[in-house]
Amino acid sequence: MSERLMEKLSILADAAKYDVSCSSSGSSRKNENKGLGDAKGVGICHAYTEDGRCVSLLKILLTNHCIFDCAYCVSRKSNDVKRAAFTVQEVVDLTINFYRRNYIEGLFLSSGIFKNADYTMERLVRIAKKLRQEHNFHGYIHLKAIPGASDELLKEAGLFADRLSVNIEMPTEQSLRLLAPDKNRKDMIAPMKYLKGAIEENREDKKIFKKAPLFAPAGQSTQMVIGATPENDRQILWMANQFYDKMKLKRVYYSGYVPVSNDNRLPAIGTPVPMIRENRLYQADWLLRFYGFEVDEIVNEENPLLEMDIDPKLSWALRNLQLFPLDINKADLSLIMRIPGIGVSSAKKIVAARKFSKLTWDHLKKFGIAVNRARNFVTCQSDVFNRRDWLPSQIKDKILQAGKSKYSPNFSPQLKLF
Amino acid sequence: MVTVIYDGTFEGFLTAVFEVYEYKFSSVNITTKERFQQNVFNNHHESLFNEEKAARVWKGLTAKISAAALSQLYKAFLSEETGMEDILLKYIQYAFAKKQTIESDYSNAAVLTVIQTAKKVYREKHRMEAFIRFQLTGDGLFYAVCQPDFNVLPLIEKHFKSRYADQRWLIYDSKRKYGIYYDRFKVETVQLSFDEKTNNGKNIQIMLDEKELLYQQLWQQYFKSVNIVARKNTKLHIQHMPKRYWKFLPEKQSDAFR
Ligand code: SF4
């Protein structure tokens, strides 16, 4: 019996791993009545895969049987792979036993679609319900909302899960039509909209009645596959921004396409995963969410692609040299955050510390700031700023030579591709 | 130069700080009994833990710096780094000397060191919350061994207590030779004495629950399956999971007991 379980786990974890989201943060679920677990605040990565990704949740499919045939997916109907399905009880037991040993923060459950959307969704919800009600489990639960599932089931899902996600998969409708003919965009947007409404309503209720039940306290997220289709970074970031703005999503994940098919609509097997691009998209996403940047400042009509050899913030700064140098002892926090080499927390340190004394390069170094990078964009106490006549390309070269990008040793051969 | 010697506990250290003021020592360093090396050129003063003195220093600090800064002080102390007591003393003296709060004066060397050290200790605390792996024993105890870089058990207690409220657990620091034990009601600091049956705790396999190995193997299988070979990045992997932690992680004991 244990061998069969082992096999199921290997098939259904393998099939689930292409969903990159593994976040377990942002919830507010507390342990109550001496139950098991909690899911408050920061998530924990209990391990890291050999490719360096965070392992926080038990991320599995309930089954990889699927009636759909999405070209980019290993579980597609037409693919010749071994199929398996967990029972409800097996998923519950694995979750509880892994959790008790401190292997995981909780469960991320997704599934291929068997029979129909509601039938599948009902099983996912049943597992979450069992964990919460029979095992008094307060750990993190992320459920995939199956496109086309009914509002009633989504509502129930929200009552037991911390986070729900509907993957949009492709950045544009055309790509979706091309690669996932059984799916339509409307079926994906509808549950997102429903969840947005239900989450907002719940947050209002919570303000009035503290005891109102939690509803998806960690909000909803989505994922786009990158590099399987020809969309440029501007289209992708524009789309992501729409999700943050209009759907109030907590996170948009970008998943570099891992070739799993010889389908000629897609990059061939063996094509490298676009990891640098994926990383640059996350950096750009970060700038949107935490640094007060607008999409247009990062990518626009003239520059629709993110630069691969430098990060998007440096790229922006080089295009806007007229704004620099900034005086570290005077400039606004919002501007200091925009200086290449200075992150949000260093920027805050600078603003706090300059109340006590005029800051010098020595201070900045001790704060852990990438001084080499920042030097080209700021002036300090007792500093001769000598960049004035340099061209953006010269600064870029200087920075590139000084600090090797953390990707260059590993992935430089892939650069040709972009 | 006077060396003030204390017992190594945080309260003992606060007492020592009190006595630096009480005896008006001006050129002074503070160190533990363990680390103290008799030196003919130096005077030394042995400070004995005194609850009232310690409390007075703590109370005085409470009036000068925020709760967050107090916790940074404590964390920096738990780093057990050589010379940390002297830096903490400088920090405290600076805090008492100034009217306004000094906790965000990153341009002051002592303040910055305390903040940075506290951050390192916090990172280790967070790592322990991530990398502790319990094994279930036959009598229902979840048992874990660790060797954290800093003395972080006092910091992780709360996390494990609220998370595993319904199970008995024990986390043992085999470097510092003490553990914390939760009996479903309260957490206590404990010393362990291992017996021969387990070869001084090295061989606890025989004490384990019958299903324990199955779950370890399932976890290993899971860890293997989620890896995406096409994305392999060993450097990043090791940066996140430094090798010194591996011996306590079942997922890194590949196939050892298959
Ligand atoms: S519906 Fe989901 S599981 Fe099925 S083929 Fe499409 S992406 Fe894969």
Image (spheres, coloured by chain):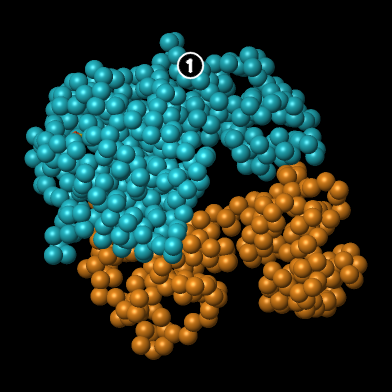
Residue placed farthest to the bottom in the image?
A: B196
Residue in the image at 14% along x and 36% along y: A116
Q: Is mark 1 on a helix, strand or loop?
A: helix
Within the image, what quadrant is residue A388 found in? Answer: top right
The tint of chain A in the picture is cyan
Q: In this view, does A284 lie above or below A104?
A: above
Cβ of mark 1 under 8 A from ligand 1: no
Where's the C terminus of chain A, which quadrant? top left
Towards the viewer: A397 or B220? B220
Query: Image check: A255 left or right of A45?
Result: left
Residue A251 in view (yes/no): no
Residue B88 in view (yes/no): yes
**Badge 1: chain ID:** A
Horizontal and vertical percent position of residue A309: 44, 27
Residue in the image at 70% along x and 62% along y: B84
Horizontal and vertical percent position of residue A351: 71, 34
Residue that label 1 marks: A296
Query: Image check: B48 left or right of B139?
Result: right
Towards the viewer: A13 or A389? A13
Assign ligand 1 to one image quadrant: top left
Horizontal and vertical percent position of residue A164: 34, 39
Task: Decide: few, some or many residues near mark 1? Use Cα within 10 Å; few <14, some 14-19, many ≥20.
Answer: few
The tint of chain B in the picture is orange
Residue in the image at 24% along x and 55% along y: A91
Circle 1: residue type = Asp
Q: In this view, does B23 lie above or below A223?
A: below
Where's the N terminus of chain A, which quadrant? bottom left
